[in-house]
Amino acid sequence: MSGQPSPQNQALHERRNAAISRGMSTMLPVYVKRAQNAELWDEDGRRYVDFAGGIAVVNTGHVHPRVKEAVLEQLDAFTHTCVMITPYRVAVELAEKLNSLVPGPSPKKTMFVTTGAEAVENAIKIARAHTGRPAVIAFGGGFHGRTFMAMALTGKVTPYKVGFGPFPGDVFHAPFPIEYHGVSVEESLAAIDQLFKYVVEPSRVAAIIVEPVLGEGGFYAAPKEFLQQLRKLCDQHGIVFIADEIQTGFGRTGRMFAMEHHGIEADLTTMAKSLAGGFPLAAIVGKSNLMDAPVTGGLGGTYAASPVGCAAALAVIDVMQKENLCQRAEQIGVRVKARLGALQKSLSCIGDVRGPGAMIAMELVKNRDAHSPDADLAKALVQRSAQNGLVLLSCGVYSNVIRFLMPLTASDAIIDEGLDILERSLREIVG
């Protein structure tokens, strides 16, 4: 495959640039015409192995037959009535299912929205209604969405905050513990203690929100002891513990939800992405007394609990359980990390390989130096891999991390093919 976009892709890319805001970036000029499981075909019929999964949205693969069947069945019945006006069975059934799946023994309730950012916004509303407090603590490198409160919580400036301020107040950030970069659990907890001493008293803090594994921030997993200490801190001060599982949820880390690895019950859990296998649906699941704190009518949305999205989500959960996709995520993780680990030994540009389950990252640096991120190499690798037939994603505060989010339904043969393309592309660049 050449380094230039093919004719159909090029023509569509020119039309796209003339018609769509430049604020919506396009990572690759690859215009998809068809997708199946872990493969994509563009407008010119060229095939790609998909290691992006729509940014962790199609854990059950593109166009899974069971999900497609459920969606078509719902389409034949009805597509929208607004769940707040005339509700329907699939929303109730999905809420019951999610309440039973989210970790922890407390009775739970659910509310539905359309996007992950909406889920985060509403989680903060619920925490404030429950506690009567305004402030929220988040973490550096965290990503929580592009709406205003979600942007305020997000711990990465470029490109998410540039030119969009001012942001909502009473949002404070602490460093996320990252062993690879020398930030210990003790330092992160000490930073929160300093916030309590110097900036905001804990009695004013409504919530602490944390990703169990940083997503956009670089796929760094929060240590178990850190999350356990956060839980204790929240209990001590009456603060709501919010687990942002938008990217980690639905099998990606080898559990249905990442918090299961740590034996910790969050007060509220946000989810979206792979919840509905490609259909716009998000949810907040939380302890019943918290979820009932807002006044009746205080939560909602016209498209919340889309019946098509709910039907898809019920099918996604069924597929995940029947096809043992959490176990499959563990198998994928072992396979991919073994291959990347072997590559790391021979290439000094790979500084770290990490991640629970199939939420895997490869950090690119100069001469094995953790403090010398190589964003240019990451960008070049994404482009070269696409030219060779593999769709990859980068991430990280320094844009030097390659993240692997292949569907959990991908076969070993497809995964190996993608890894072959990755290795060839990287060696073509670095020699």
Image (cartoon, helix red, strand yellow):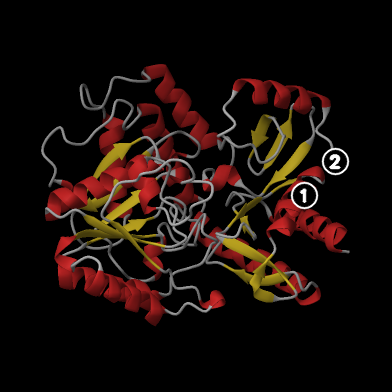
Vertical relation: 134 (above or below) 338: above
Vertical relation: 253 (above or below) 285: below
Crowding around mark 2 (Cα neighbors within 10 Å: few <14, some 14 to 19, many 20+) is few
Placement of the N terminus among the 4 image quadrants? top right
Left or right: 422, with 129 as reference point: right
Left or right: 395, with 411 as reference point: left
What residue is shown at x 62% (from left), y 47% (from top)? 52
Secondary structure at numbered mark 2? loop
Vertical relation: 95 (above or below) 69: below
Q: Mark 1 = which residue?
A: 385
Please give the count of numbered marks on the rendered protein: 2
Left or right: 84, with 429 as reference point: left
Q: At label 1, which amino acid type do we have?
A: Ser
What residue is shown at x 70% (from left), y 39% (from top)? 28
Q: Mark 2 = which residue?
A: 3
Placement of the C terminus among the 4 image quadrants? bottom right
| N-term-proximal mark, 1 vs 2 | 2
Task: In this rendered view, identify the residue nearer to me: 228 or 416.
Answer: 228
Q: Position of residue 85 (x, y in %)?
A: 20, 22
What residue is shown at x 15% (from left), y 32% (from top)? 297
Q: Position of residue 179 (x, y in %)?
A: 51, 77
Secondary structure at numbered mark 1? helix
- Where residue 49 sits, quadrant-wise, is top right
